[in-house]
Image (cartoon, rainbow, N blue to C red):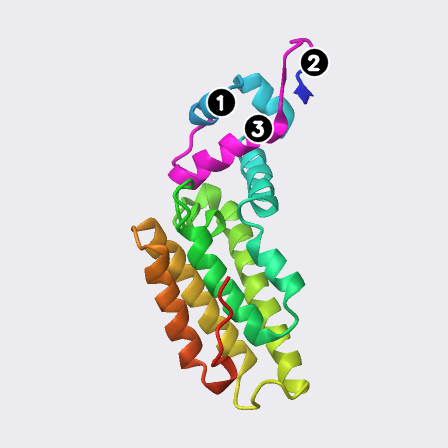
Amino acid sequence: MAGVPGQGRKFDVGTALEQAMFAFWEHGYEGTSVSKLTSAMHINPPSLYSAFGGKEGVFFAAVEHYLATRGDFMDRAFSEEPHAVKLISRLLYDAASHYTDESCPGGCLIISSAVSVTAANQGVADRLRDMRNANVALLSERITVGIADGVLPTSWDPVEISEYIGVIIQGMSQRARDGATRAQLERVADRTLASLGAAAATPLRT
């Protein structure tokens, strides 16, 4: 629980961040005003500024909440799948499932919430870009290890493959927001794995 000095009012931070997450997810960073946030979070502006410092503070707290809850599938895949091919397969099929979850606005908060921003908010977009790039770099490292261990073909270029998968996953997020179904995105995953050749011949569906 968080309280504001002098007001004697408390609110549940987890619940408030859940609502903020949905607001940013649906309307984007710039489309979510402070008034929309306070309404969604059921708190007043002084409480918001006292607890989070402002809109940007709420946003990145909501991003962390997303990564710990509805958006945790990528971190779990990276931690649980040491083999690069199984990791790629799991990322693709989990994305198809999570991005089309009808209880959410669709797609990925980190991919869609700051696609286009004004110069004043470029720092927000840059931080999200760095998060996305970090996942691509991590996948590249995992592929490099797989090649060194002899479980992946030497013809694979780690940077090229990881960029390719990154583009596919980001595209899946947008297609989900545009109404693509889980089945449709799973077929995208099927074709993506098939395009990688024999090393990805056995998809890992979840």
Q: Residue at x 42, y 58 (%)?
A: 96
In the image shown, does 137 or 123 lie closer to the viewer? Answer: 137
In the displayed structure, 63 sits above or below 175; it is: above
Taking the magenta stretch, the answer to whether it contains residue 94 is no
In the displayed structure, 15 sits above or below 113; it is: above
Image disc number at residue 38: 1
Q: Residue at x 37, y 56 (%)?
A: 182
Side of 36 where 41 appears, left or right: right
Q: x, y percentage for residue 118?
A: 40, 44
Q: What residue range appears in magenta?
A: 6-34
Q: x, y percentage for residue 173?
A: 40, 55
Sequence-earlier tag: 1 or 3: 3
- Classify residue 68 by image quadrant: top right
Amino acid at pointer 2: Pro
Image disc number at residue 15: 3
Amino acid at pointer 1: Thr
For label 2, the SS is: loop
Image disc number at residue 5: 2
Sequence-earlier tag: 2 or 3: 2
Q: Residue at x 47, y 81 (%)?
A: 201
Q: Do tag 2 and tag 1 residues touch (Cβ < 8 Å)? A: no
